[in-house]
Amino acid sequence: MIIDGRSIAADILAEAREIVSTLPCVPVVRAVVVCPSPATESYLKVKSARAKDAGMQMQVVQVADNASTEDVIKAVTEPGADCVIVQLPLPEGVDQDAILASIPEAQDADVLSANAYISFEQGMPDALIPPVAAAVAEICARAKVVVSGKKALVIGNGRLVGQPVWQWLHQQGADALIITRATQDSLPLIIPNMDIVVSGAGSPGLVQPEQLKEGVVLIDAGTSESNGAIVGDADPRCVEHASVFTPVPGGVGPIAVACLFRNAAILARRALLTNTPA
């Protein structure tokens, strides 16, 4: 099965739009960005379009390239937004952990602040799932993949993909491993035994078809540029061995963005309920 990420994203955005339709005003999602690259600017345009699809308004706040940590935190905590996104990566010279920690949990649709992530990590009832992990969950549910008891491998341990996806797989009862840059030499030995592989390394051609177990669930969440094209971590020929395969582009990416705005809609609804007199 080749996953049509754009179709799944459309369904999720419709869910978000339905939630937003019950609110008295249009939610504002603020994106704080420092030193954006051309790729970042393109990604923000996509997010702005999907925010509109979800019935929300995207407010992009570009902080000066020479901004201090305090300047960025001020942009994050400024009143007037229902949700706040800090666009990663941040440049050297600012304290990323301090900036992410400044995102109020009630406004953290990306689940990047320590408090929001701990709630997810501990499986709290109202915890949001980080967008890429939520995308993996959607793919598994729609492809009827049973995660519990399966051997799963996550390639990369970043904040956006590797860490939350490993945590979600672990919560679902998978025997989940994570490979980092320091241990990636072990990949050829480990990957042939895996039932589920999720890659977020951003390394073109890292996963080759001859390495894979027949019928593997292969979810490619890595993106990078190769010869002017956006490509994933998995060689496209891997589709011949996979029971579930996500192409790049058009796979995990659109779903994760849609999950971000579904999270934003949920937070906006919670804020309304919290502030409504009993």
Image (cartoon, helix red, strand yellow):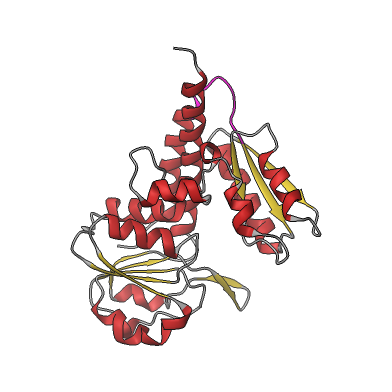
Q: Residue at x 68, y 48 (%)?
A: 32
Q: Residue at x 41, y 41 (%)?
A: 11
Q: Residue at x 61, y 79 (%)?
A: 227
Instruction: Say if residue 31 shows up in the picture.
Output: yes
Taking depth in this image into account, of 88 and 253 the one nearest to the observer is: 88
Chief SS of the magenta region:
loop
- Picture mark count: 0
- Residue extending farthest to the top is 278
Left or right of 208, for residue 29: right
- Residue extending farthest to the left is 149
Taking depth in this image into account, of 228 and 141 the one nearest to the observer is: 141
**First to last magenta residue range:** 20-28
- In the rendered image, residue 24, in percent from the top left (x then y), is placed at 55, 19
- In the rendered image, residue 255, in percent from the top left (x then y), is placed at 45, 51
Q: Is residue 141 above or below residue 229?
A: above
Q: Quadrant of the C terminus?
A: top left
- In the rendered image, residue 188, in percent from the top left (x then y), is placed at 34, 86
Q: Is residue 210 above or below residue 100?
A: below
Q: Quadrant of the N terminus?
A: bottom left
Please tell me whether residue 27 belongs to the stretch shown in magenta.
yes
Taking depth in this image into account, of 206 and 115 the one nearest to the observer is: 115
Instruction: Say if residue 22 shows up in the picture.
Output: no
- In the rendered image, residue 82, in percent from the top left (x then y), is placed at 59, 33
Taking depth in this image into account, of 199 and 273 the one nearest to the observer is: 273
Left or right of 34, for residue 182: left
- Residue 150: quadrant of the picture: bottom left
Q: Is residue 55 above or below residue 153?
A: above
